[in-house]
Image (spheres, grey):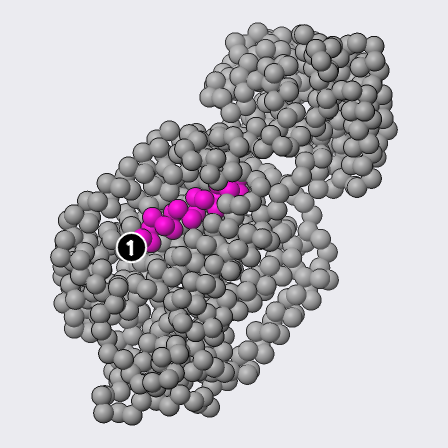
Amino acid sequence: MATLLYRLGRVAFRWRWFVTLLWVAVLGAVGFAAVKAPAAPDDGFTMPGIESQRAFDLLEQRFPGTAADGASARIVFVAPNGEKVTATENRAAIEKLVTAAADGAQVASAVDPFAAKAVSKDASTAYSTVTFKVKADDLSGAAKTHLERAIDTARDAGLTVEVGGDALATQPAAGGSAEAIGIAIAAVVLLITFGSLAAAGLPLLTAILGVGISMSAVLALGSAFGLSETTGTLATMLGLACGIDYALFVVSRYREERQKGHAPREAAGLAAGTAGSAVVFAGLTVVIALAGLSVVGIPMLTKMGLAAAGAVLLSVLISLTLVPALLGFWPDAVLSRRERKKGMRRANGENGGSRWARIVVRRPIPVLLLGVIGLGAMALPALDLQLGMPGDEAKSTSTTERRAYDDLAQGFGPGFNGPLTIVVDAKKADDAKSAVATVSKEIAATGGVVSVSPARFNSAGDTAVFSATPATSPTDEKTKQLVQTIRDERSGIESKASGASFEVTGTTALNIDVAQKVQDALIPYLALVVGLAIVLLLLVFRSLLVPLKAALGFLLSVLAALGAVVAVFQQGHGASLLGVDQTGPIMSLMPIFLVGIVFGLAMDYEVFLVSRMREAYVHGDGPGEAIVSGFRHSARVVVAAALIMMAVFSGFIGAGASMIKMIGFGLAVAVLFDAFVVRMAIVPAVLSLLGNKAWYLPSWLDRILPRMDVEGEALSRKVPVPTAGTPTAPLTPVP
């Protein structure tokens, strides 16, 4: 591996014009394809294999012309100054709005609250639901404007009018400024680390190029594979972070080889052969974790994972080819000013990394206990984890969606914001109306159900849908129990309905089902990615204990990160500091995101740091000195890489959406815990306690496993380090 990549690095350095123009041509070709490609169809969020999804599918089949997940606007009216909405003037204003809304483009229906009895008991509040034929993303500007004007007219009449639902909701942007902030902080970290504008700019340039190609590819292939810009969000985040980090490691190793006295082209080859080998295996661990997201069974998550895996693979390729090529254009510019001025080798003296490693090696037990106990304490809130999907209740009170949510809860009860949708299939029933009435009556009598709406039949008269309002809020644990109770009593209810069957769906039930499916998939997913990564690390380090230690350290850091997320976003500790307006359940996909993404990134640091220890050990250092040597060469770069990752992820904490804040915060603290506590403290402490046993591999297994030579042992024999008497390589480009 090292020899092959060494040759690749030398070739890229030598043919730098060809390699650079090739990558620019790839960007141009993919970008042109993205511009010409048709827009990807919006296949929405689907979750095969759960009851909520089956009910949605049945609705789309039996109620043609109206999408089961079509956009809707729930318009909430509150009478002013203690008046009633049933007062003559207020009622007239509401009915005028409903009539105007029904005449709007793309509208399927607009419900009169007085006809539908959608008025609170004290008559202070009423609501009307406007349903559209298309999804929110497909609503025309004219349709939205028409509804907004009707709402403004009702407000002018003195009513307080707020709007919930997704029809008029504004979607906070996840990228843009967040990514710009991350890039800016990354640039500062790189400049401090390298002391050279060229060295700081090169990783940024190559990472941005990789993200450009990745996102263009997503858009170009969108119509063929159902990809969209949303699918590419994760690819952008990881492509940027990994692209910077991988280039950072190659450039750092190039500078190190130049300090040893190697010529620029030789240094580029050695950097690709050593740091490049670590990049390959680190990238593969990330790809394994991302591709493994497909086992969860959520099509959107599978697409996001595969798109992000492609972006990471692209980052690896760019680091191995384009980075050496660009080093060929500026072989001396990436060196620090002191190195360019002196033009001489520096001895491997002490630095902050080696001094820290010596402290850990001398006192491994206190460091290990402090790290494990600290992360264990951070992980404790995870025991209180409640999965769900934050809705309008998690938005700022400055939004009309949040105010509509609060008004409905005050006027109709907390469960009114999360009604359960009951879909009754009466196709096999002798009397469809009687069967539906029986199902409605039985569900209305279920404890925890406040009311049920009148059933609405399709044109064929064989399918009906009605709503059941719980007594508790959508995120309350009692609502989850109610859904389970209704489903448990299904057989008894259906036996009374003589041939009819029903299923429970709606946003609340869907969130409950998604949370359960993700929870069921978490252990198999964890076993898959950890198992495959242990095998991969076994090949890299040729050790039994190092891969196991790496996996256990990851589990500790990801649990601590999950605990921090629960503490802030669910329990509310420090939530105001992050601009979180309302605490609630943790997004259902958050544990999967944390496990998948953080595992890959954690293995990055493991490979980069421990591979240098392995390299020193193979070249003759003792166990303790190998740890110190690994930290001397890698600690500063790993710290910089972690800070860059944290900067990229932390930029998303400033986003408007609570879910995006949660993802950014969770990933940032996970990198913090894993890089600075696990890899910088627990890993050297454990390796110090294990001594030579850390690198033990049974002889029979040693014979079976292929030799990957990540530490570059073959290169050290092929390309010896220049001796002290050898003239230092000139600071000039070499053809």
Residue at 51% across / 51% down in the picture?
651
In this view, 395 is above or below 248: above
In front of the other: 178 or 63: 178
Q: Is residue 666 magenta?
A: yes
Magenta stretch, residue numbers: 659-676
Residue at 32% across / 64% down in the picture?
636
Residue 277 relative to residue 333: left or right = left
In this view, 328 is above or below 528: below
In this view, 28 is above or below 658: below
Residue 104 screen position, x and y as percent = 84, 32
Residue 431 screen position, x and y as percent = 71, 11
Residue 276 screen position, x and y as percent = 38, 71
In front of the other: 562 or 149: 149
Residue 572 relative to residue 708: left or right = right
Residue 296 screen position, x and y as percent = 47, 42
In this view, 187 is above or below 135: below
Residue at 48% across / 18% down in the picture?
478
Say which quarter of the image contains residue 615.
bottom left
**Residue position marked by numbered label 1 in the rendering:** 679
Residue 229 relative to residue 3: left or right = right
Magenta: main secondary structure equals helix
User: Is residue 494 among what the camera can see?
Assistant: no
User: Is residue 713 among what the camera can see?
Assistant: yes
Residue type at numbered disc 1: Arg
In front of the other: 218 or 87: 87
Say which quarter of the image contains residue 526.
top left
Residue 424 relative to residue 47: left or right = right
Q: Secondary structure at mark 1?
A: helix
Say which quarter of the image contains residue 246.
bottom left
Residue at 76% across / 39% down in the picture?
139
Q: Label 1 neighbourhood size at 10 Å, few (<14), some (14-19), many (20+)?
A: many
Q: Quadrant of the N terminus?
A: bottom left
